[in-house]
Structure formats: structure tokens, C-alpha cells
Image: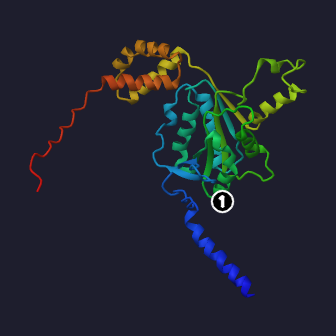
Amino acid sequence: MQQLASLLARAEQLLVRLEPLLPAAAPAPDWENAVAFRWRRDPGKAVGALRAVHQAPSIRLADLCDIDEQKARLDANTRQFLAGRPANNVLLTGARGCGKSSLIKALLNAYAAQGLRLIEVDKSDLTDLPDIVEQIAGRPEHFIVFCDDLSFDEGDAGYKALKVALDGSLAAPPENVLIYATSNRRHLMPEYHAENLENLRVGDEIHPGEAIEEKVSLSDRFGIWLSFYPFDQDAYLDIVAHWLRHFGCDAQEIARAERPALNWSLSRGARSGRVAWQFARDWAGQKAPEASPKPAQRASKGKKR
């Protein structure tokens, strides 16, 4: 008995010495003062943490022009989710800069007061999805896990982790969590011309058709697909005009900006909402009156006492 007590005492002393070397527990998320969060894993730590984003983008649904059909569909799904009715995970795919991620951020601003919250997760951290869901499963808010610009290479661990989180785990997903992902690829994986030829050999794959099925199986687990397309000239100019009005330009200034806006899109090789917004910022910034520079503080010439 005395030997056991001595062993326990030594073990306690060892724990006291090791405790300062252990990583500190992650602070609890600031649920009360933030509506957006990022999942981050610090170097050297095995477990990540939810970090509050206190300066969320101010984009509104009304700022997103010429994607009315996609906007209405995602808005309806999100309202179903907030009302406690069945709703789907959503994959938004298509042309770059056409409003995929902006639409999700605008929904957060529209419905944050109704309990909507956004958690941004990088592709490299998708293996932590079970830990994220565990933290938010019992909360009263409704959470959208947001994966932006998603794509995978062969063998990515996040690929299977996301498949399981969507529709493959033994445990049912919590009712207060949905996944919204954006990607330029509809099937999220690289595809090759040879894979369309079922009767030809593709590498060492004996059944190449089954390998193709594996590639499309992830996107199939999203209940809703929304496709975004490049804007035509009229739609692009509509978006330019919207943002110029937002920056305080009048109708005459907007009319003068049309030709420069088209030249800007040609130089960028795309007509998209992002390009329109970037042009409007540049144009409005050049036309705005220059702010008076603040007078420089004079250096004291007095002797130090």
C-alpha cells in the first residue's frame, strides 16, 4: 500500500512538471459578438479552434445583379433551414468572379439577426469537420459551414472527410448545420479525356468507369447544384453602373464610364461581377476629390530635460 502511495505521489509530481509544457486550451468562440467564424489550427497544435471574425463583409443581396435565379434558389433554401424545415447542402459552381462566394456572405448579412452564422473552413482543414460539428451541434443558432474555391487532387484527405460529413457518417448530421461550397469545377476533381473511354485502359485501373463514379460521388452528395455563367456585355455594364452608384457617381459619370469599363474587362480577359466591382472602385477613386493631407507634426526642438 505504501509503495502504491509513493508511486501515485511521483506521478502527480510528474504531471505538475509537464502541465506548463502542454498547449493552452483554445478559448471559447465569441458567440455573442460575432456572426462569422474561421476554423484555424495553430502550428504545433493537434486541435483547431473557432476564431470570431468581427469585421465581416458588408455585401448585400441587393448588390448582386443578374444572378436572380441563383439568388432566389439559395435564399429559399436558407430560409427553409432557418425555419427548421428540411433544406439541402449546396454546391455553387461556374465562372470565376460571378458572385458565388459573395452570395453566401450576403445571405449571412441578410439573416444574421435570425440566427444564421457562417463558419469558413479551408480545404486543408476539412478533416476537422467532425470536431467543428461537435462544437456547434447543441447551439440554438443555425450554422453554414462555408468551403470556398473547393477542388481536390487525387488522394486528398479532405475529399473523403467531406464525403462523410455530407452523407456518409453513421451519425446523423445535426439539424442546425448545412454545408455551402463554391468551386470552379462541378465535380471538384480533375477529369481527363481518357476517362471518357470506358473500353480503353486508363493507367493501372481495371474498371475505369468505377473510378469515374468515385470522382462524381462527392458532388452528388450536395442536394442542390447552382451554376454561374460569364456575364454578357449588358449584364456587365449593369453591374458596373450599380457599383458606381454605390460609390456616389451620378448618371452622367456612369455614362462616361461605359467605354472605359469595357476596355477594363478586355484587359482582364473576363466580364464578371468581380471585374465590374474592381473597375468601379478604380473609376470612383480617381474621380473623387482628393482629401487634404494632414499637417505633419512638427518635431520638438527643445532640449530634453
Query: Position of 211 compared to 141: left or right?
Result: right
Residue 73 visible in the displayed image: no
Q: Which residue is mark 1?
A: 138
Instruction: Looking at the picture, tell me which residue is in the foreground, 205 or 89.
Output: 205
Across and down, in percent, residue 69 comes to 62, 29
Q: Is residue 42 above or below residue 58?
A: below
Q: Residue at x 50, y 58 (%)?
A: 32
Quarter of the picture holding the N terminus: bottom right
Quarter of the picture holding the C terminus: bottom left
Q: Quadrant of residue 123?
A: top right
Q: Residue at x 90, y 26 (%)?
A: 206
Query: Position of 295 compared to 10: left or right?
Result: left
Query: Position of 271 compared to 258: left or right?
Result: right
Q: Residue at x 86, y 26 (%)?
A: 204
Instruction: Looking at the picture, tell me which residue is in the foreground, 73 or 132.
Output: 132
Across and down, in percent, residue 82 comes to 63, 49
Judging from the image, the colouring scheme is: rainbow
What amino acid does circle 1 point to? Gly
Across and down, in percent, residue 280 comes to 41, 24
Residue 100 visible in the displayed image: yes
Classed neighbour count for the residue bearing mark 1: other residues with Cα under 10 Å, few (<14), some (14–19), many (≥20): few
Q: Is residue 244 above or below residue 175?
A: above
Give the mark count.
1
Q: Secondary structure at mark 1?
A: loop
Q: Quadrant of residue 140?
A: bottom right
Residue sitting farthest toward the left: 302
Across and down, in percent, residue 190 comes to 72, 26
